[in-house]
Each structure stands twice: as structure tokens, then as C-alpha cells.
């Protein structure tokens, strides 16, 4: 049996076998725009024998400054613009990326933080997934009052409903994240089906 998703599709489509039937060892498979799958049944389970997977990607950013970032506190970047990629992954209410289908994802952030009060001697920049896999960070040594940083991270086992965000941590009294496209987060799905 074959399935082909239209390139203009704006929703996800879930394939679900009958009762306990599995599709390549999973109860369901989620497909989206431009994907196709040719499935073969052995009488009790389904296997994909041909098709095309399309990785979900997204890039979000701050276009205005995010002010009042407290000292010694992990503070997420609250993105205020979706700039490219899969709109289904944009959580505009919370300013972050939402995972809409299970899989493995690569995230990279670029955050630009500047002290507004006090002296800043260090800052950390990273990405975080809501699952119990914790944040990944990169330390940035500072020569002045600003810091730019970021670090790619890979998460396998992400599930629908997880989110990914970028964050900063610093020691100034207060700081701000620069907007005007200076702070952003990109996420790419690694297609496996």
C-alpha cells in the first residue's frame, strides 16, 4: 500500500496499523508535506520498502532585545520571530521550538548577551530539550561587556510535545539578549524512516 503526502500539506498525517500491527517496529508513523511511503505487509506487520523522508527544520530568532536577564540564572531566549522552516514546529506563545514527531534532532544556537548593570566576567550559552537529557553549554571567556556563543547539540529519543530552546547564563547584575537577528536557534531533524 502506498502513501504520498502533498507538498502543500499543512498538517501532520499519522499512519496507524490495525490493532497491534507495527510499522517498522512502531505503532504509528507520522508523515508530513512531500513525504511518501510504500508499505509491505507480511500478514501481521508492515515494513517500508520504498519512499521519501523529508527532514523537518526550523530557525527562530529575537528581533527585539530581551531585557532583564538576571545574574546566575539560566534564562531561555524567548524568540519572537519564525524565520525559516517548518511552521508546525514554531511555538509562538512560548518563543521556542516544539517537537511534533519523535526522532533525533540537532540544535544550534547563536546568542548575543550584553551586560546592562554590573561587571560580567563569564557567560555560558547553550540549548536545552525539555526531556530529561539536560542542557548543553559552551563557556565563553569575556574580554569586554558582551559575549557571543553557541554550541550544536544532538538529541535522540525526542518525543512529540518536547521543546527545544536556547539559553544564557552570566554573572553580571543584569544583562540583555540582543535582538535584531543577533540571537537565534536552528533545529534540524535527522530523518530515520
Image (spheres, rainbow, N blue to C red):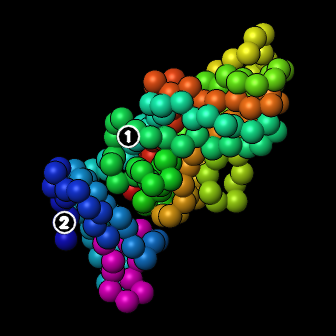
Q: What is the spatial separation of the Cα atoms under label 2 and label 1, in whole angstroms?
A: 33 Å
Image quadrant holding the N terminus, namely bottom left
Residue at 38% in and 40% down: 82
Q: Position of residue 25 (x, y in %)?
A: 46, 71
The span shown in magenta is 15-24
- Chief secondary structure of the magenta span? loop
Q: Where is residue 158 in the image (x, y as percent from the top left)?
A: 55, 58
**Number of on-image labels:** 2
- Find out whether residue 176 is within the magenta segment: no
Query: In the depicted view, which residue is nearer to us: 178 or 133?
Result: 178
Q: Position of residue 85 (x, y in %)?
A: 34, 40
Q: Quadrant of residue 112?
A: top right
Are the residues tagged 2 and 1 within 8 Å (C-beta)?
Answer: no
Residue located beneath label 2 in the image: 2
Query: In the depicted view, which residue is nearer to us: 53 or 6?
Result: 6
- Left or right: 119 in relation to 129: right
Q: Which mark is residue 67?
A: none
Q: Which residue lies furthest to the front in this view?
A: 117
Q: Where is residue 48 in the image (x, y as percent from the top left)?
A: 32, 63
Reading the chain from its start, which is encountered first: label 2 or label 1? 2
Can you say whether 144 is above or below 73 in the image? above
Residue at 82% in and 39% down: 72
Residue at 70% in and 29% down: 175
Q: What element carries label 1?
A: strand
Task: Name the mark nearer the viewer: 2 or 1.
Answer: 1
Residue located beneath label 1 in the image: 82
Q: Is mark 2 on a helix, strand or loop?
A: strand
Can you say whether 147 is above or below 150 in the image? above
Q: Does residue 183 appear anywhere in the picture?
A: no
- Left or right: 16 in relation to 113: left
Is the residue marked by circle 1 packed among few (<14), some (14-19), or many (20+) residues within 10 Å? Answer: many
Amino acid at each position: 500500500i502506498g502513501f504520498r503526502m502533498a507538498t502543500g500539506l499543512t498538517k501532520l498525517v499519522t499512519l496507524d496499523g490495525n490493532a497491534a500491527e507495527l510499522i517498522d517496529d512502531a505503532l504509528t508513523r507520522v508523515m508530513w508535506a512531500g513525504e511518501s511511503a510504500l508499505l509491505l505487509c507480511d500478514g501481521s506487520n508492515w515494513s517500508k520498502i520504498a519512499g521519501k523522508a523529508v527532514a523537518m527544520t526550523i530557525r527562530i530568532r529575537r528581533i527585539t532585545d530581551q531585557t532583564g536577564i538576571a545574574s546566575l540564572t539560566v534564562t531561555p531566549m524567548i524568540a519572537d520571530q519564525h524565520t525559516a522552516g517548518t511552521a508546525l514546529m514554531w511555538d509562538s506563545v512560548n518563543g521556542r521550538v516544539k517537537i511534533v514527531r519523535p526522532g533525533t534532532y540537532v540544535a544550534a544556537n547563536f546568542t548575543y548577551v550584553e551586560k546592562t548593570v554590573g561587571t560580567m566576567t563569564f557567560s555560558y550559552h547553550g540549548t536545552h530539550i525539555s526531556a530529561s537529557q539536560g542542557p548543553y553549554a559552551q563557556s565563553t571567556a569575556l574580554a569586554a561587556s558582551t559575549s557571543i556563543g553557541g554550541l550544536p547539540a544532538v538529541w535522540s529519543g525526542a518525543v512529540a510535545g518536547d521543546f527545544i530552546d536556547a539559553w544564557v547564563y552570566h554573572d553580571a547584575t543584569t544583562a540583555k539578549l540582543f535582538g535584531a537577528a543577533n540571537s537565534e536557534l536552528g533545529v534540524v531533524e535527522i530523518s530515520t524512516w
